[in-house]
Each structure stands twice: as structure tokens, then as C-alpha cells.
Amino acid sequence: MNILFIGDIFGKTGRKMIATYLPKIVEKYSVECVIANGENTSHGKGLLQKHYDELLTYGISLITMGNHTYSKKEIFDYIDEADHLIVPLNKPLAMPGVGSRVIEVKGKKIRVTNLLGLTFMDGKPQNPFEAIEPVLENDSSDIHIIDFHGEATSEKIAFGYYVDGRVSAVLGTHTHVPTGDEKILPKGTAFQCDVGMTGPYESVIGCEKEAIIERSVKGIMTPFRVVEDEGQLCATLLHFDGNKCTNIERIRIDPQVKFK
């Protein structure tokens, strides 16, 4: 079984990249399940219902989120009925949403869990190392993939080793920069610090580069402006032999890395 995980979908450009290339990737790699991080899908922050519905039409089975989960107030109107949406499991207790879901694909029960890192992260999430334990204790799924939405590579690596052998894969999101450290950990868990971003190519993590440079050079708090231009798609392909992940592979499409 091949499972595709798509990195943070950012704005209109990210949605266009999904619409254009996801069917081609699914066909080329015989993908049977698609998971995507969607917390930046609507104008760079949050997920409007129309965009949630749009992503599902492209064949995405489950959508994970992150620190921008509640950036769009509209999410409170539809989150309880959004059966394909997974919010951080360790979110503040008062916030709505489901942090871990199981779907069945080709007779396999696939669990996907979303977690927020603690380092440099606003919103006061609970400890992800503690939050995952009740899920693991009661899990009967065949495959378990964790989207660890965090800033610090060291925290993600530590978490990967913490759950090594207890979950199928730990894939990092949030930084929008793909890392080249994909591997199978000693006890069998597939790992990558960050899958990367699916969104504007000539940008600073999705935003207009000039505004970010001005902030850095002059210290002026210029507003972030979402770029709508040429796109990139970053994803990670997991190959399973039975219930065991035997290969992890990065996929990247951009103006310099053409899809073949």
C-alpha cells in the first residue's frame, strides 16, 4: 500500500498545485490513501469550509491542521460535522475538534493523529509526549501516521524516537521547508522532520518576500501578504508491506523540478 502525505497547503497557489498534480501523482505512484496538512489553505491561515470541501473533491481522505486551526472563525460553524478533519490532539481542552481519526482503506485501518509541538509555539498546547499515550494504549489500527506540527527539528526528532516502533510514521509539518532526513528509525517507524509546503514557489514560506525582507532589514512590522504565483508541491510517499512501512520517499514539484 502506498500512502501520500502532502505538506502544508498554502493559499490559492497551493490549492491549484493539488488540483493539477495530485491526480498525476496518484496514478504514477499507485497511491491508495492521501493525507494533507490544510492549516494554511485559506489565504495562508486557517481553513474555510468551501476550501475544506474543495480539498476533499481532489481525493484527499484526511486533512490535518496545526497552530492556525482556529484562525478563521467559520471553522466553529462546521468543525463538528467535518468528519475528514483532524485538529491537534493536544490543543487547549476548551477548543473543539477531533485529534485522531481512523479510516479503512483496502481492508486496512489507518489512523492519523495530529500533534502540536511546544517549542516556539503559541496557543499553550498540552505536552504532545503525554497527549499521545492514551491513543497508543487503546489503538487497534493497522497503520498509524502522526503529523507533528512543530517548529524545532530537535523536538520532532526526539518525538520520533519516543514513539519509534509504536507508530508507523512521524511526519513533521509547519516550517514549510522540506528536510532531507527521511529514514526508517531503528524500531521501524518512518520519519521526516518536515514534509515542506505546497504553495507559492518564489516566496518566504508562502508570503511575499519583499515584506519579509523589509521586516528583517528595517524592523518594520509590515503585514504578511500571500503570494499568488508559480507553485511548488512537497509531499512524502510511504510504502507499506503489510502493516510495516518499508520505504519513505520525498516528492517535490516546482518550476525547476518538473513532474515526470
Image: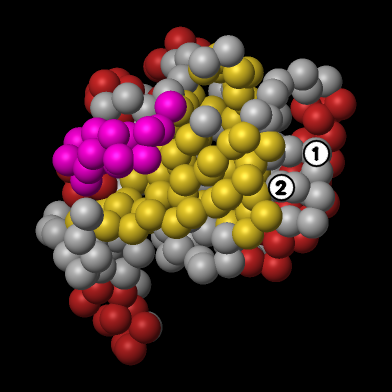
Residue drawn at the location 46% of the way across and 20% of the way down: 84
Tell me the element at label 1.
Answer: loop
Instruction: Verify whether residue 23 appears in magenta.
Output: yes
Q: Amino acid at mark 1?
A: Arg
Residue drawn at the location 29% of the way across and 81% of the way down: 213
Q: Amino acid at mark 2?
A: Thr
Q: According to the image, what is the colour scheme of the structure?
A: secondary structure
Circle nearer the N terminus (1, 2): 1
> Which x, y percent locates residue 91?
65, 36
Q: Which residues are magenta?
A: 17-32
Left or right: 4, with 10 as reference point: right
> Which x, y percent locates residue 110?
60, 24
Are the residues tagged 1 and 2 within 8 Å (C-beta)?
yes
Residue drawn at the location 77% of the way across and 60% of the way down: 158
- The residues tagged by marks 1 and 2 sit, at their Cα atoms, a distance apart of 8 Å
Left or right: 244, with 236 as reference point: right
Q: In this view of the protein, can residue 50 be seen by the observer?
A: yes
Residue drawn at the location 71% of the way across and 47% of the way down: 189
Number of residues whose C-alpha sits closer than 10 Å to that of mark 1, classed few (under 14), some (14–19) or many (20 or more): some
Please tell me whether the stretch drawn in magenta is mainly helix, strand or loop: helix
In the rendered view, tell whether residue 105 sits above or below residue 18. above
Instruction: Verify whether residue 78 appears in magenta.
Output: no
**Which image quarter is the C terminus in?**
bottom left
Residue that numbered label 1 is attached to: 166
Residue that numbered label 2 is attached to: 189
In the rendered view, tell whether residue 108 sits above or below residue 25. above
Q: Quadrant of residue 201?
A: bottom left
